[in-house]
Amino acid sequence: MLRVENLVAAYDGIKALRGVSIELGPGEFAAVIGANGAGKSTLLNTVSGLVRPVSGKVLLDGKMVAGLPAYQIARRGLLQVPEGRMIMGNLTVRENILLGSLTRNGRTPAHDLDGILDLFPRLRERMQQVAGTMSGGEQQMLAIARALMGAPKVLLLDEPSLGLSPLMADLVFTALSKLHASGLAILLIEQNVHRALEVAQRAYVMEQGRIVQEGSSRELINDARLIEHYLGGAVAAA
Amino acid sequence: MWIFGGRSAPGDPSETCVGRIVAWMIAQQILNGLITGSVYALFALGFTLVFSVNRVLNLAHGAVFMSAALLSYYLVMIGTPFVIAAAVATVVAGGISMVVEFVALRRLRRFSPHVMEFAALVTTLGADIVLVSLAHKLTAAQTVRFPFGTFPNQFFLLFGLRISLLQIIIVLSVACMLSFLVFYLYRTSAGLRLRAVASSDRASLLLGINPNAVYAQTFFISGIMAGIAGVLIALSFNSINAHMGESYMLKTFVIIVLGGLGSVPGCVLAALFFGVAQTLCVAYLPPGSADIILYALLFGMLLVRPAGLMGNAANISVVGRNA
Ligand SMILES: Nc1ncnc2c1ncn2[C@@H]1O[C@H](COP(=O)(O)OP(=O)(O)OP(=O)(O)O)[C@@H](O)[C@H]1O
Ligand SMILES: [Mg+2]
């Protein structure tokens, strides 16, 4: 479905990705974890076309998309829910969702509006609300709903739990599990290692622009060294 | 006190009569002011539209306005019927505006927003100078006028007030353009895309929207609006010269500050108000005092409500029901 080969990206000549390879099969749910500044967002943004790769390949359904402008990559069904949500704060919830459906480009969505609102019932009551006035958690749901309206082939998510209360984060992760169960291919970036390993089947560990480890979530969650490394003080305190 | 005719003692017909005439004159001035203001609104809305979506003060807007006026003049001079000349000039103005975007802004967008915003002032001013100098050469620095009879000089009575055919055309074209703009922005998917880019160009990219196409579109619509305003103003005053856009740019700054940057309804209200205030000042106050009063007003507004009449609450990216 999605194949990233030896992707290299740089900001002003400073490399942020040093040859990253990732593979995501149809209907698969994988996570990328790693510390702050490891290059996780850079990876997603390069795959999405917001950052131009220096070298390497990004293949969607076997077709090369690396180097295309971001809007064309989105139209092909590689949809990113960006870090910080980036909903259109001035538009209503309904308008944001409608905007998502403009990305379809002829694909039939696996979830229609009703299905998406069943997934996020909170949005249903708020269709006329100005999106910027919603809580962070509701905005995150909206950002995911908006991407789903575009009939994604692959859904990329950049730290959807960032700044959310545990309860809200639960709602979001539950929704992601349901989406996975319905057959959507998902690539999730998370700092919250425990949660990520709970919902994803496989995970990649990223460090300084490289993938340093990969394996099934079950393997990784039992890897004490890894958990200690990435959760650091948090585990020690727990 | 004789402005209020009704107040004078009954049985003093002469005073009542004078009062009526003065009230009628003021009403006539207000009508004229509203019509002038509606053209200001058209011009200022084009400027605001570009600002809302591009975050750029397009200093070449006045030159686009002037280009349309001048082009319609040349087309009429070579024998084109006025209506066709006006239509062609308007569309070409939209085209010129797109070229301004392409040449002066497209390449700047790769820089960070604050660098781009400042550089854009310089490049759009450059575009303005190029267009104005070109017109200056073409007209040999002269003011040109449409030949007599280009537009029928007909008058009608409306509730006892005089209104010319041209004024009716002005009101109709402004109303059409305004309805089109509101419909386009709030009822079409192209308008939704436009407001999405106004809200966040980065998020728009991730939603499959090509911001460059939207930028070009806003400049085209904005140029059309400047073009229509240019032709209407050229006809109203029957006077066209290379620098005619400049005073309208100044008025636009006052209007958008009064109305609130980026607000459609604020811009229209402020423009109408400006038109009326200006007409009344010119009619009843010593020459030259109009500008003093209008700019004092602007200053006062900035002190009291820096965001303008309808700042923030209603800018273009905001939902339709606020429009
Ligand atoms: N726009 C940019 N310009 C220059 N350098 C950048 C830019 N964005 C990211 N970087 C640098 O690239 C590196 C990777 O950043 P990135 O945002 O991809 O990390 P991340 O893994 O997503 O971190 P976080 O978990 O904090 O979101 C960092 O060193 C960062 O400083
Ligand atoms: Mg990040």
Image (cartoon, coloured by chain):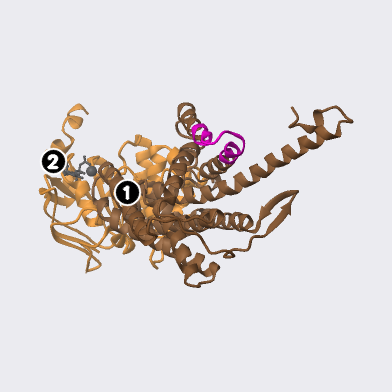
Chain colours: A orange, B brown
Q: Is mark 2 within 8 Å of ligand 1?
A: no
What stretch of residues is rendered in magenta? B277-293
Q: Which residue is mark 2?
A: A226
Picture disc at residue A11? none
Label 2 or label 1, whichever lies nearer to me, is 1
Q: Which residue is mark 1?
A: B125
Q: Nearer the viewer, residue B85 or A104?
A: B85
Q: How many marks?
A: 2
Q: Nearer the viewer, residue A83 or A31?
A: A83
On whether residue B286 falls in the magenta region, the answer is yes
Is B100 on the left or on the right of B277, as rendered?
A: left
Compute the Cα span from label 2 to label 1: 58 Å
On whether residue A118 falls in the magenta region, the answer is no
Q: Nearer the viewer, residue A213 or B77?
A: B77
For the residue carrying disc 2, how many other residues have a C-alpha within 10 Å: few (<14), some (14-19), or many (20+)?
some
Q: Do residues under tags 2 and 1 come within 8 Å of each other at their CB atoms? A: no
* The N terminus of chain B: image quadrant: top right
| Residue displayed at 22% across by 56% down | A47
- The answer for which chain carries disc 2 is A
For the residue carrying disc 1, how many other residues have a C-alpha within 10 Å: few (<14), some (14-19), or many (20+)?
some
Give residue B88's position: percent from left, percent from top. 47, 67
Q: Amino acid at mark 2?
A: Leu
Q: Amino acid at mark 1?
A: Leu
- Circles 2 and 1 on the same chain: no
Q: Secondary structure at mark 1?
A: helix
Quarter of the image where ligand 1 sits = top left
| Residue displayed at 64% across by 60% down | B153
| Residue displayed at 34% across by 60% down | B99
Q: Secondary structure at mark 2?
A: helix
